[in-house]
Image: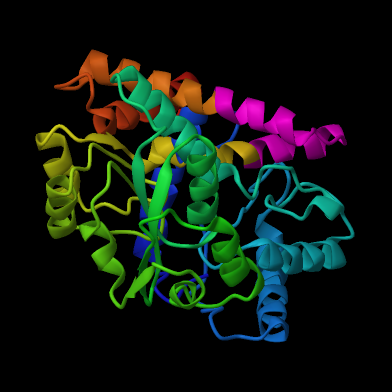
């Protein structure tokens, strides 16, 4: 749910989702949907009314063995709850027809954290394969939504120092390391703007331009906000600032020119269809739990997520070594590894 949503964006996301789901190795297909409804500034009642109206049309086209939507930009736990409630109200069915549900009504532990956590697990594997470490690295993370918050949480727990985050109004720089509890209070509880961080945390500063985040020196950059947020100018600034690795937490947040520049300069680059697949992978785990009518512990789901992200990296790295011009060209590796499985499945089923 975002004012920029249009058919072209959904076509792109649908293709990206198909290849991403292919990389997970899980029995899920691919597709995308959305609305240009803007939840910003709306009351809970207005958002509930929209979600209920939306589901009144959508319910005919989804089902636990048909299409299973999940959250994305502007669609978090609150919106999923409203959508799911309306689905049950219309159909009378309690089934795993949406993922990202609340724990109280069939959701999975780790689903909220999964995309951000998975991104860091992928980065760990990629860095280790190239004799680098996430621990002791300085990290900047664009965005301050679900993906960014939990990428920050996991990066910190793995020993990294996150020094910057952002939202559409600008970015904050905290050279002492981001205080995640303050970010969570601002974004998850108060639903406020990130500039408030600078008023609450000494020695931090706010810059009224979200793109300025890429000019803050770092070892690792994790774009986790939105499509095409990291352009060629930003890529040049990152390389000049000492960046050695970039991991896409959002769906294709890096422009083609910026991606090519990173590859040319030898910056390790983790493409979104591989690096941010943790969210959809955990959605598939949620579907499995719903189908089996059971619930796994946080540690069980997290361990499965780590295994899946390790497997995704291995497939990506193998395809890069086999088909790409460089063994570290993970962009080509992810594209080919994802495409091959889809193509082979289509041919096996007589579609081609």
Q: Where does residue 197 sit, x and y in percent of width and height?
A: 48, 72
Quarter holding the C terminus is top left
On screen, residue 315 above or below 242? above
Residue 352 visible to an observer of this rendering: no
On screen, residue 1 above or below 218? below
Q: Residue at x 59, y 57 (%)?
A: 71
Q: Residue at x 49, y 47 (%)?
A: 151
Q: Residue at x 25, y 15 (%)?
A: 321
Left or right, 331 with reference to 101: left
Q: Where does residue 314 sit, x and y in percent of width and height?
A: 41, 18
Residue 218 visible to an observer of this rendering: yes
Between 15 and 259, the one lying in front of the other is 259
Tell which residue pokes out farthest to the front in this image. 202
On screen, residue 223 above or below 168? above
Magenta span contains residue 284: yes
- Give the magenta part as a residue range: 283-307
Magenta span contains residue 326: no
């Amino acid at each position: 749910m975002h004012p920029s949503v249009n058919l072209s964006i959904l076509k792109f996301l649908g293709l990206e989702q198909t290849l991403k789901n292919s990389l997970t190795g899980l029995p899920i297909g691919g597709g995308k949907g959305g609305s240009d409804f803007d939840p910003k500034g709306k009351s809970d009642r207005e958002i509930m009314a929209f979600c209920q109206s939306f589901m009144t049309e959508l319910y005919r086209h989804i089902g636990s063995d048909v299409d299973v939507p999940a959250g994305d930009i502007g669609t978090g736990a609150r919106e999923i709850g409203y959508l799911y409630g309306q689905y049950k109200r219309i159909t009378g069915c309690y089934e795993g027809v949406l993922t990202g549900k609340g724990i109280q009504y069939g959701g999975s532990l780790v689903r909220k954290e999964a995309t951000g956590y998975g991104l860091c697990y992928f980065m760990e594997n990629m860095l280790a394969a190239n004799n680098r470490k996430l621990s002791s690295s300085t990290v900047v993370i664009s965005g301050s939504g679900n993906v960014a918050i939990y990428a920050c949480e996991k990066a910190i727990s793995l020993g990294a120092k996150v020094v910057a985050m952002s939202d559409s109004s600008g970015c904050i720089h905290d050279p002492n390391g981001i205080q995640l509890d303050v970010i969570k209070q601002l974004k998850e509880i108060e639903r406020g703007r990130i500039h408030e961080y600078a008023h609450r945390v000494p020695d931090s500063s706010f810059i009224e331009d979200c793109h300025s985040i890429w000019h803050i020196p770092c070892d690792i950059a994790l774009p986790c906000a939105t499509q095409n947020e990291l352009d060629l100018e930003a890529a040049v600034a990152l390389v000049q600032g000492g960046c050695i690795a970039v991991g896409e937490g959002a769906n294709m947040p890096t422009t083609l020119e910026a991606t090519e520049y990173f590859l040319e300069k030898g910056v390790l680059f983790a493409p979104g269809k591989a690096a941010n697949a943790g969210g959809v992978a955990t959605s598939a785990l949620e579907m499995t739990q719903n189908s089996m009518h059971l619930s796994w512990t946080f540690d069980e789901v997290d361990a499965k997520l780590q295994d899946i992200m390790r497997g995704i990296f291995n497939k990506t790295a193998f395809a890069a070594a086999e088909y790409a011009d460089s063994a570290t060209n993970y962009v080509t590796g992810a594209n080919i590894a994802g495409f091959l499985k889809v193509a082979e499945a289509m041919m096996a089923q007589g579609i081609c």
